[in-house]
Amino acid sequence: MKNEITVNGKRFGVSLTSSEIQKRVAEVAEQINSDFKGQEVVFIGILNGSFMFAADLLKSINLVSKISFIKVSSYQGTSSTGEVKQLIGISESLEGKNVIVIEDIVDTGRTIKMIANQLKQQNPANIKIATLMFKPTVYSEDVTIDYYGFKIPNDFIVGYGLDYDGYGRNLKDIYTIIK
Ligand code: 5GP
Ligand code: MG
């Protein structure tokens, strides 16, 4: 395996191998299976970054479940409100459902907070957050991160769904930027 790669002109070194990721993702799935035993769950994957994590996680979920994907889209509001974000792609009702949001990475938490707030408006029975990567030293929101794959320092990573300027999502290992 190559330990160093270049993505879009920047150098990265491998930090989590595919087999480490697979092992951990299966453990997270087992936690969810046990917490929701006998219940039905709607998984909501956040595109684009979560597509690999969602696929691997769901393969180890043995609950009666549905999966759909949504996207956070940004558009420019008025100059006073600045950037506005909204969720696109929610088609089914979440009313009374157990919802688990699947994210690639939680950094400051602003994104997941916005997603959780908007999903709550649909009155689900509860909303849990499952993220592959979590940067606890940067996190500054009050939304509970219920499930996480790996806690990592505040360094930029790519691979396994995560991108650098759109590139690198296809890598099966996770790489950290070399400063
Ligand atoms: P937050 O709103 O929690 O600050 O940021 C979350 C979003 O920032 C993620 O969904 C992801 O798009 C991006 N992000 C944060 N840290 C990283 C990182 O280390 N690598 C990549 N590729 N994206 C990141
Ligand atoms: Mg993202």
Image (spheres, rainbow, N blue to C red):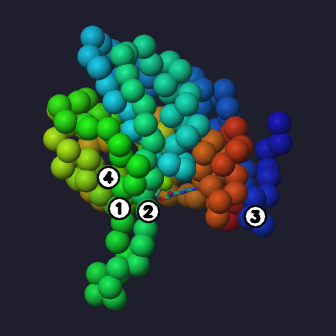
Spatial CA distance of label 1 from label 4 is 8 Å
Q: Name the residue: 60% across, 26% down.
A: 22
In the orientation shown, which residue stands out farthest toward the right?
2
In the picture of the structure, the residue carrying the numbered disc 4 is 115
Q: Please identify the quadrant where the N terminus is shown.
A: top right
Looking at the image, tell me whether mark 3 or mark 1 is earlier in sequence order.
3
Compared to 17, does 103 lie above or below? below
Are there few (<14), some (14-19), or many (20+) residues within 10 Å of tag 1? few
Q: Name the residue: 37% across, 15% down.
A: 63
Camera-nearest residue between 82 and 162: 82
Q: Name the residue: 18% across, 49% down.
A: 121
In the orientation shown, which residue stands out farthest toward the front?
91
Spatial CA distance of label 4 from label 2 is 11 Å
Asked if ligand 1 lies within 8 A of label 1, the reply is no
In the picture of the structure, the residue carrying the numbered disc 1 is 86
Closer to us: mark 4 or mark 2? 2
Q: Where is residue 30 in the image (x, y as percent from the top left)?
A: 42, 18
Are there few (<14), some (14-19), or many (20+) residues within 10 Å of tag 2? few
Looking at the image, tell me whether mark 3 or mark 2 is earlier in sequence order.
3
Compared to 38, does 149 lie above or below? below
Closer to us: mark 3 or mark 2? 2
Are there few (<14), some (14-19), or many (20+) residues within 10 Å of tag 3? few
Q: Do the residues labelled 1 and 2 touch (CB within 8 Å)?
A: yes
Judge from the rendering whether residue 160 lies leftward or rightward of residue 115; answer left or right. Answer: right
Residue 17 in view in this figure: yes
Spatial CA distance of label 4 from label 3 is 29 Å
In the picture of the structure, the residue carrying the numbered disc 2 is 73
In the picture of the structure, the residue carrying the numbered disc 3 is 8
Judge from the rendering whether residue 58 lies leftward or rightward of residue 121; answer left or right. Answer: right
Closer to us: mark 3 or mark 1? 1
